[in-house]
Image (tube, rainbow, N blue to C red):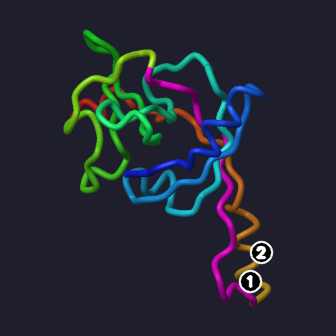
C-alpha cells in the first residue's frame, strides 16, 4: 500500500499544496514506487480522483488511493492495482474527515543508468504529468 512520510503531514498545515513520495505498488500503473506527488490539501474530491487519506485503522499512516464512489459512512476507495490490496475491500468505507487532499501532479525521477540520449528524452516526455481523474471511474471501479 502506498505510504507517505510524516514530513508530508507536517507540511500541510503551512500551505494548501505539499509534496509526498509514493512507496508501494497499489496504484500501479498510475503511480509507481518512488514517484513524487504534489498534493492539494483540503481540496474537494469526486469519484475518480486520486487522494491522500489516513488509513482507517492506522491513522498515523497516510495512503494514496482512488475514490470509487460515495457510500453510507464515507468514501469507497480502491487502488489501481487490483492485486495489491490495502483498500476499501479490506477496511470498508473511509470517513470524509480521513480524506486529506487530492493528488494534482506526479513527477517520476529518472532510473539509475538512464544515460543514453534516447532514454533521457523518453524519460523527459513522461516524467512529469498531471494526475487526472479516471475517465471511466464509475464502470471500471465498481466492477471490483
Callouts 2 and 1 close, C-beta under 8 Å? yes
Tag of residue 121 = 2
Q: Which residues are magenta?
A: 98-115
Tag of residue 31 = none
**Res. 92 image quadrant:** top left
Asked which secondary structure carries label 1, the reply is helix
Residue located 58% across and 37% down the image? 132
- The answer to whether 83 is drawn above or below residue 56 in the figure is below
Q: Position of residue 50 (x, y in %)?
A: 50, 35
Residue located 62% across and 20% down the image? 43
Q: Position of residue 100 (x, y in %)?
A: 54, 26
**Res. 138 image quadrant:** top left
* View extreme (top): residue: 72
Disc 1: which residue: 118
Image label count: 2
Of the pair 102 and 41, the residue shown nearer to us? 41
- The answer to whether 99 is drawn above or below residue 1 in the figure is above
Crowdedness near tag 1: few (<14), some (14–19) or many (≥20) residues, C-alpha within 10 Å = few
Question: Looking at the rendering, in which quadrant would you find the C terminus?
Answer: top left
Q: Position of residue 18 (x, y in %)?
A: 71, 38
**Res. 113 image quadrant:** bottom right
Marks 2/1: CA–CA distance:
5 Å
Crowdedness near tag 2: few (<14), some (14–19) or many (≥20) residues, C-alpha within 10 Å = few
Of the pair 70 and 121, the residue shown nearer to us? 70
Q: Position of residue 107 (x, y in %)?
A: 68, 55
Amino acid at each position: 500500500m502506498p505510504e507517505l512520510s510524516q514530513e508530508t503531514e507536517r507540511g500541510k498545515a503551512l500551505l494548501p499544496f505539499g509534496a509526498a513520495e509514493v512507496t508501494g505498488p497499489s496504484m500501479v500503473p498510475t503511480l509507481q514506487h518512488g514517484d513524487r506527488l504534489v498534493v492539494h490539501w483540503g481540496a474537494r474530491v469526486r469519484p475518480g480522483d486520486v487522494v491522500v487519506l489516513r488509513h482507517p485503522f492506522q491513522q498515523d499512516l497516510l495512503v494514496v488511493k482512488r475514490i470509487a464512489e460515495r457510500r453510507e459512512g464515507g468514501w469507497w476507495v480502491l487502488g489501481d492495482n487490483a492485486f495489491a490490496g490495502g483498500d476499501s475491500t479490506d477496511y470498508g468505507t473511509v470517513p470524509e474527515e480521513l480524506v486529506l487532499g487530492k493528488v494534482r501532479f506526479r513527477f517520476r525521477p529518472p532510473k539509475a543508468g538512464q544515460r543514453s540520449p534516447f532514454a533521457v528524452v523518453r524519460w523527459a516526455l513522461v516524467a512529469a504529468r498531471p494526475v487526472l481523474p479516471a475517465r471511466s471511474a464509475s464502470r471500471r471501479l465498481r466492477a471490483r
